[in-house]
Each structure stands twice: as structure tokens, then as C-alpha cells.
Image (cartoon, rainbow, N blue to C red):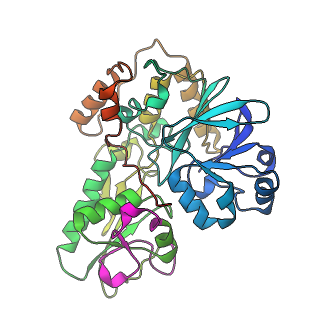
């Protein structure tokens, strides 16, 4: 849950992911993605008045633009679409800055914002990107292939705690989810799957992969269907008709229920979450079984190790946490880790715990040693490869 108040200290004229109170005086607004904790104030009369009467604009990705136009039609004329990886000038009253949106691997349309002005600032929003993908992002390099100097990173610290040292890759988690589905459904027509999720949106990658592998759509409720139907890659992967499938997700009379019942069907519940999976829980794997309720570690936020890798790669001068727990001990841990990172450039890196596939961990370490050799055709060829980060989604105009 984002606790970021919206203001970038280095660029006080703009607001990001917050649209109330002191942010209403901003000259430009930015939205990283359409999750409610990043949209506080966006549907208020006060914000509407600021946009329309002061002729202010909200800058978003292509997918987010389509979602916003459906959710809040009044915004449609005040939305400005940003192209991935492309610098766009933003003209403020007393200066001009540049912004580059970078896909963040969190949910449909989610982006980081790289702001460049007197200082270069990265706002990560919610993100989970594989280190090997991060190293290919051309926005982090100048025209000569040299790393840009980042002054401040506004960091997604949802799991920036040593208790969440490392998560399984999406590929690993999905392999287990699909195995659980196929095994259960092979037992007969009355065996039903319930996909239990911790948020209303953000599972498009899971749905797509399940559909591709199992060849059966996921039954979801009408509100979720309206949202996901904006994404062409999900065509066929979701349905409003429960009779067409044996896989169900939040399609009952409440967010946590499905339309089928245990009296008539044998139901296996698969619960995707990350918060419950601390280091000690992951030592024996990342699935547990409680009477056909299977918990699977699946995260759309960076783990502690992934956060450290981002910071070690970018080497910013300052880091601002965007998610605090309002727990003195936990927040002190976050700030302690930040201070350690900012002051240990010449110290040896800590060893990773032995949690998952050693070969994959070895590959991650090897990725750290790769050297970017300039902007050339080879670099452009590998730029759009999908590794652990989910594929980019598109949306029609």
C-alpha cells in the first residue's frame, strides 16, 4: 500500500500518484498505474476543477489511458499519453523537464517515471523487473552508452525488508499454479478450481498463462471483466459465463467467493500472495497445502534482493521509500537498509540465501557482471526480450 504523498522534492511543480490537498497546486500530474492506493483524489470535484479550469494534464501510459477513460470519462480530454522509453518534454511555468516512462512489470500499464531536469530522478511506482531486464533499459544510458547519474530513487519498499529476501520468479510460481490446476481437474468434471487473489486487479499475466497452458478461460465478475477486457492479450482468457469453465476467480456474490459451492463440487483453492512468505517459509519451497487450500508465493512487487539489485545498478545519491508500514521497528529496518546501501559502495556484497534453483541464481550473478558496450544494433535487438519480467500489454485506442 503506497504511502507516498505525491511530491517529488527535486521537482515540486509536479505530483505523482496523488491528487489531493497540496498536490492540487501542481502544474502537471503523473499516474504510474490504476491501483486505488496510487489514485487517491483522482475522482474528486476538486481535482476535476484543477484539470478543467486550470487546463492541467495527467500523463500516463497507453494502457492506463484506456483504463482511465473507462473509469473516469471526465478525464478523457485532460489525459496525455506517454510512449514507453521515449523522452517527452513537460513545459512548466518556469522551466522544462523531460519524462521517460519505463514498463515496471507490476500490472497492466504500470510504469516507472524517469524525470530529467536539473537533477535526474527515478520514481519506481510499484515494480518488479528482473535485473537482466533492467540492465537493458536504454533510458538509463546516455547517447554514448554511459550510465546516467541518478540523484534520487523514489523506491517501492513494499517488501524492502530482509524477511522478504527473495521470491520465486513468476515462471516458477506459475509452473506450480498450473500443475495444481491440471492435477485437480484431471480427477473429474466436478473438480473445480478457485483462484483466490489479494487484489481486484493485476493478475492478467496469470490469467493469460493459465489460459495458454490449460486451454480453459477464467470466470470472473463483471467489474473485473470490464477492466480486463480492455487488454487484447486476454481475449478468450476470461469469461462471464461460469458454465464455460471449471476455473473461477472472484465470480460470486462477494470479492472472496465464487459462484460454485462445496456441496455440489469438489473445490481446490489456490491462493496467490507474497506477504505471508518470509524467508523461513520459503526454505522448504513456496507452496503449502491446507485441506485443498494451496498457498502459492506470487509477487508483483520486488523482493528485498531485487530492490538492492536495482539500487546497486543505478547508484543513486539518495533513496526515498514510497511504502512505509507505520510500525517503528519495520520502518527503522527499511531506513537502515537504505542507509547501508548508500554508504557501502566499496564493501563486498552480501551472499544470497540458498532458496531456489542454484542455476538461476548463478545466472543472476552473471548478469551483474555484464558490461553495456554502447548503443548499437545488438543492444536494440535484445532490448525487448521478455525474461522474468512479464510481457508488455497493449490496449486499442
Q: Position of residue 133 (x, y in %)?
A: 37, 35
Whether residue 83 is situated above or below residue 334 in the rendered picture: below
In this view of the protein, which residue sits in the foreground, 253 or 212? 212
Residue 192 in sight in this render: yes
Where residue 69 appears, x then y in whole percent? 60, 63
Give the quadrant of residue 352: top left
Which residue is at a point 35% across and 18% down the rendered structure image?
373
Q: Is residue 271 visible?
A: no
Q: Position of residue 140 (x, y in %)?
A: 48, 27
Image quadrant assignment for residue 322: top right
Q: Please, which residue is most extreme toward the top here?
A: 346
Relative placement, left or right, of 387 versus 257 is: left
Q: Please, what is the dominant secondary structure of the magenta stretch?
A: loop
* Highlighted magenta segment, given as a residue range: 228-255
The residue at 55%/17% (across/down) is 343
Query: Horizontal placement of 68 versus 10: left or right?
Result: left
Which residue is painted at 51% across and 72% down in the image?
A: 255
Q: Quadrant of residue 124?
A: top right
Does the stretch in magenta take in 136? no
Residue at the far bottom in the pictured view = 264
| Number of marks present in the image shown | 0
| In-image side of 264 versus 62 (left or right) | left
The answer to if 236 sits in the magenta stretch is yes
Could you say where residue 125 lies in the image, as x and y percent from the top left? 56, 43
Left or right, 213 with respect to 14, comes to: left
Front-lying residue, 100 or 1: 100
Q: Nearer the viewer, residue 207 or 255?
A: 207
Amino acid at each position: 500500500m503506497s504511502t507516498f504523498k505525491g511530491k517529488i522534492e527535486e521537482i515540486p511543480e509536479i505530483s505523482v500518484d496523488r491528487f489531493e490537498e497540496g498536490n492540487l497546486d501542481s502544474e502537471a500530474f503523473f499516474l504510474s498505474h490504476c491501483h486505488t492506493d496510487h489514485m487517491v483524489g483522482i475522482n474528486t470535484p476538486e481535482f476535476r476543477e484543477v484539470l478543467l479550469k486550470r487546463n492541467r494534464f495527467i500523463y500516463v501510459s497507453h494502457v492506463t489511458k484506456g483504463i482511465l477513460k473507462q473509469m473516469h470519462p471526465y478525464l478523457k480530454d485532460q489525459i496525455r499519453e506517454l510512449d514507453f522509453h521515449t523522452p517527452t518534454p513537460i513545459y512548466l511555468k518556469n522551466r522544462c523537464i523531460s519524462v521517460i516512462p519505463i514498463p515496471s512489470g507490476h500490472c497492466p500499464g504500470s510504469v516507472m517515471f524517469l524525470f530529467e531536469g536539473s537533477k535526474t530522478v527515478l520514481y519506481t511506482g510499484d515494480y518488479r523487473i528482473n535485473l537482466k531486464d533492467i540492465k537493458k533499459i536504454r533510458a538509463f544510458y546516455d547517447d554514448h552508452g554511459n550510465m546516467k547519474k541518478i540523484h534520487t530513487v523514489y523506491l517501492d519498499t513494499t517488501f524492502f525488508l530482509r524477511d522478504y529476501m527473495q521470491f520465486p520468479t513468476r515462471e516458477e510460481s506459475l509452473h506450480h499454479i498450473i500443475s495444481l490446476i491440471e492435477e485437480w481437474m484431471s480427477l473429474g468434471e466436478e473438480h473445480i478450481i478457485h483462484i483466490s487473489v489479494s487484489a481486484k486487479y493485476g493478475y492478467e499475466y496469470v490469467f493469460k498463462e493459465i489460459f495458454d497452458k490449460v486451454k480453459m478461460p477464467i470466470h470472473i465478475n463483471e467489474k473485473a471483466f470490464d477492466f480486463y477486457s480492455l487488454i487484447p492479450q486476454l481475449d478468450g482468457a476470461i469469461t462471464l459465463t461460469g458454465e464455460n469453465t471449471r476455473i473461477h476467480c472472484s465470480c460470486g456474490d462477494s470479492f472472496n467467493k465464487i459462484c460454485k459451492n462445496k456441496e455440489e463440487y469438489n473445490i481446490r483453492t489456490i491462493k496467490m500472495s507474497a506477504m505471508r512468505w518470509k524467508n523461513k517459509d520459503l526454505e522448504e519451497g513456496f507452496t503449502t497445502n491446507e485441506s485443498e487450500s494451496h498457498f502459492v508465493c506470487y509477487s508483483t512487487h520486488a523482493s528485498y534482493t531485487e530492490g538492492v539489485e536495482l539500487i546497486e545498478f543505478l547508484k543513486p545519491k539518495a533513496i526515498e521509500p514510497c511504502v512505509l508500514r507505520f510500525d517503528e521497528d519495520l520502518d527503522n529496518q527499511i531506513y537502515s537498509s537504505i542507509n547501508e546501501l548508500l554508504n557501502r559502495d566499496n564493501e563486498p556484497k552480501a551472499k544470497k540465501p540458498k532458496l531456489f534453483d542454484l542455476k538461476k541464481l548463478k545466472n543472476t550473478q552473471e548478469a551483474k557482471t555484464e558490461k553495456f558496450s554502447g548503443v548499437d544494433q545488438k543492444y536494440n535487438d535484445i532490448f525487448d526480450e521478455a525474461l522474468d519480467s512479464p510481457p508488455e500489454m497493449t490496449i486499442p485506442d
